[in-house]
Amino acid sequence: MVILLATRLRSATLSRIRERVLALLVALVLVPLPAYALDPTDLTLTVTPELSGNAQPYAREMVLLKLRGVYRTQILLEEMRQPALTNFSWTQLGRDTWDRTRMPDGQMALLFERTIAIFPQHTGTFTIEPFTHKLTINDNGDRKVIDVRSEAIEFPVAKWTAENGGPEAPEPWWLPARDVTITDSWDPDPETVNQGDTARRIVTLEAQGMLAEGLPPRPVMRTRGIVTFAGPVKRETIITPTGPIARATYQWDLKKGVAEVIALDGIQIPWFDTVSRTMRVSEIPARQIGGGLPDREDDLRPPSPASWVTIGAAAFAAFGLGLALIGFGARRPVLRLGRPDRRALRRAAGSNDPVAFRAALGRAMQAEPDLARAWHADPQAAAALSALDRTVYGAVPTSAPDLHKLAKLFSQRRKAVASVLAEEPGLAPLDGWGRPAR
């Protein structure tokens, strides 16, 4: 009996010990593990807006957001979670870049960079919510997921205070850009269009620092004497590392309905220069429709029959001219570019291409050295040529001169430059006579 009682007591004791151990194990399992912690300087993500001239932007003006993450750990996976960017339109410029950078303490770290172009849609003060970089890191052989967040950014958008224009004005169209260029081309040349003929005009508008949907609608091209058929508008956005470039191509077919010459006025396009913070104006150039080219019209006119009286007068005039040349010596000849060269200059001016214009002018100067000397002797022509060379070959970009005015200037007739000394015969060194002593 004593033995049986001792056995039961041992069994009860073991059961109580077993229950206590099990309860202790369950309690240990249910205790939460401590959160993974890193030094705040090991994982940082910053978002910095680049403001042009450190000035508050206006509505629809481009601002670059520079994302920069510095991570002093091994990254297995990553995912950038971008906020909604309410009240902004945006586009990412290129792909994310990963590199290595040296920390102030000399250690190496991973460097993440991304550039986003944002465009505020309204005036006011907005908040850019934090960006979150979700990282899967290697912590001593264990995979851990960590969220690295940037700070929220207060983003004020300035109100336009000038009297005219601005983002809220319905007219003129608000066009904030770093630069605006206009290219104008015709097929055929508008000056050769006769009554009943049709010419096609294509105008290309490019704006740096804009999206294509921000470019103005097709301008209205209407005047007396022509019938205009507007073609489709082609828009495209070209992404570059410094920002998007917006391009719009406008097309018209113009039919000449009257016989007289038609003057087509230029169309001004005002735009806001985001670099200098000033308003500027670009222009679709004015053109003449019909009338023929000045040199071509005289060449195509049929010659009128000459009478005997006219022939006699011409002979007498020629006899008198001969006497004048004998008595007073020959005058300087009159020089002028040939029709193909003048046509090439007008074609380059019509397409607003200073490079093609300078190339055509260079070929003409090489073919007509006497005319080139006359241009260099004329202060106006020499100054125009220098300005054109600065535009084409200069290291600093400059605005192109008015190519239509230059085409008229270099197409004018000019007198040959008088030489102070008579030209030396080409065979002078071979004729047995030395040069006179000076």
Image: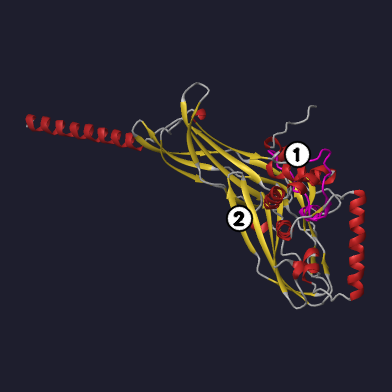
Q: Residue furthest front?
A: 432
Q: Amino acid at mark 1?
A: Glu
Colour scheme:
secondary structure
Count of picture labels:
2
Q: Residue at x 61, y 40 (%)?
A: 152
Residue 213 at x, y = what percent?
65, 59
Q: Nearer the viewer, residue 35 or 258?
A: 258
Looking at the rendered structure, the secondary structure element under dot 1 is loop
Whichever of labels 1 and 2 marks the residue nearer the N terminus, that label is: 2
Residue 103 in magenta stretch: no
Q: Nearer the viewer, residue 91 or 21?
A: 91
Label 2 CA crowd tier, 10 Å (few <14, some 14–19, many 20+) = some
Left or right of 72: which side holds 243?
right
Q: Main secondary structure of the magenta part?
A: loop
Q: Residue at x 82, y 77 (%)?
A: 258
Q: Nearer the viewer, residue 170 or 330?
A: 330
Disc 1 + disc 2, Cβ < 8 Å: no
The quarter holding residue 308 reads bottom right
**Magenta segment boundaries in residue numbering:** 394-422
Residue 126 at x, y = what percent?
68, 46
The correct choice, above or below, for 89 with respect to 80 in the image is below
Residue 84 at x, y = what percent?
58, 51
The correct choice, above or below, for 188 with respect to 37 in the image is below
Instruction: Name the residue that disc number 2 marks.
Output: 237
Q: Amino acid at mark 2?
A: Thr
Q: Residue at x 66, y 52 (%)?
A: 210
Left or right of 311: which side holds 347?
left
Instruction: Name the residue that disc number 1 marks.
Output: 424
Check residue 121 in the rendering and tell me which mark sits there, or answer none.
none
Quadrant housing the C terminus: top right
Looking at the rendered structure, the secondary structure element under dot 2 is strand
Residue 166 at x, y = what percent?
79, 53
